[in-house]
Amino acid sequence: MTLSGKSTRWAALVSYDGSQYHGFSVQPHGIKTVGGALTSALSVVFQSQIELVVAGRTDKGVHAVGQVVTFDAGMPKSDRLLKSLNRLLPSSVRVHEVVEVEESFSARFSAKYRCYLFRVSKVGSVSPFLDNRTWQVDKVLNVKRMCNASGSLIGSHDFKAFCKSGGSDGRPTRRMLFGVEIIESIEFVDIVLWSNSFCHQMVRSIVSLLVDIGTGRYPGVVIHQAIVSGNRSILHSVAPPGGLYLFGVGYEPFDAEVKRVWLERINSWSFSGPSWTVGRV
């Protein structure tokens, strides 16, 4: 309930370094989370109890470039909203925009897809400044083999083998994967995935298997085998969280032009915040 009793639906565009947080979701007993930090700052500025709806609940150690949250509150206390919010937040969390949206808009339920980026450092690019921000793999990757194998992921599949629970929690494991791109640069191999939603550890599991294919540990057909069998034991490991970024959230239907725009954003990104606004996500 706001002080005025009148509520407005707000949307915020947020980025954060998740290295020091136990994920996004607010947790009890003072456990440090991104959602906890955001809720605390927003509650002060809006002078009301804030409950966040988030587009993607990132895990411990996972980052975000363009996370989206929505919440209901009255008008903010400060006329310099962003400055006030960011002054209250730790330097590892930044709010880039807060705008009024339609009451029906939900950061989570209005989203048509999520875009995740996993950044792998190539051999020879190991740097202390990339610790907890990339996966520093110590073997040469055959990117062509990874690209060829990734095609099996696209489409509507039961991703049971790639979900941490393996479906044992009763939650559905079928997802629509709209696209996969593997981009090689001088320093990095970036793995980009778009899906209507991702189950717990799905991206990190996919990345792990693709890297194992790239190093020659497994043949490319293992991706298809994992999907068909639903057998999670096929995975050798799960990629570490530090290389994973919720890069952005889309509220329009996914198509070739949308994919091109996101790839342009990724190619121009260098650990900065989002280059787009809530109205353009």
Image (tube, rainbow, N blue to C red):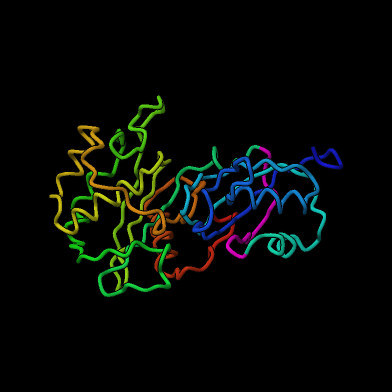
Q: Which residue lies furthest to the right in this view?
A: 4
Residue 173 appears left or right of 251: left
Question: Which residue is at 57% across, 50% downward?
Answer: 68
Magenta-span inclusion, residue 240 = no
Locate residue 22, reporting x and y percent.
Answer: 52, 49
Residue 106 appears left or right of 5: left
**Closest to the observer, 252 or 175:** 175
Magenta-span inclusion, residue 101 = yes
Residue 59 appears left or right of 84: left
Above or below — where is 103 with respect to 114? Answer: above
Which picture quadrant has residue 153?
top left
Quarter holding the N terminus is: top right
Question: Which residue is at 24% across, 66% downward?
Answer: 138
Locate residue 49, reporting x and y percent.
Answer: 75, 42
Above or below — where is 21 with respect to 55? Answer: below
Locate residue 90, reporting x and y percent.
Answer: 64, 62
Residue range (magenta): 91-103
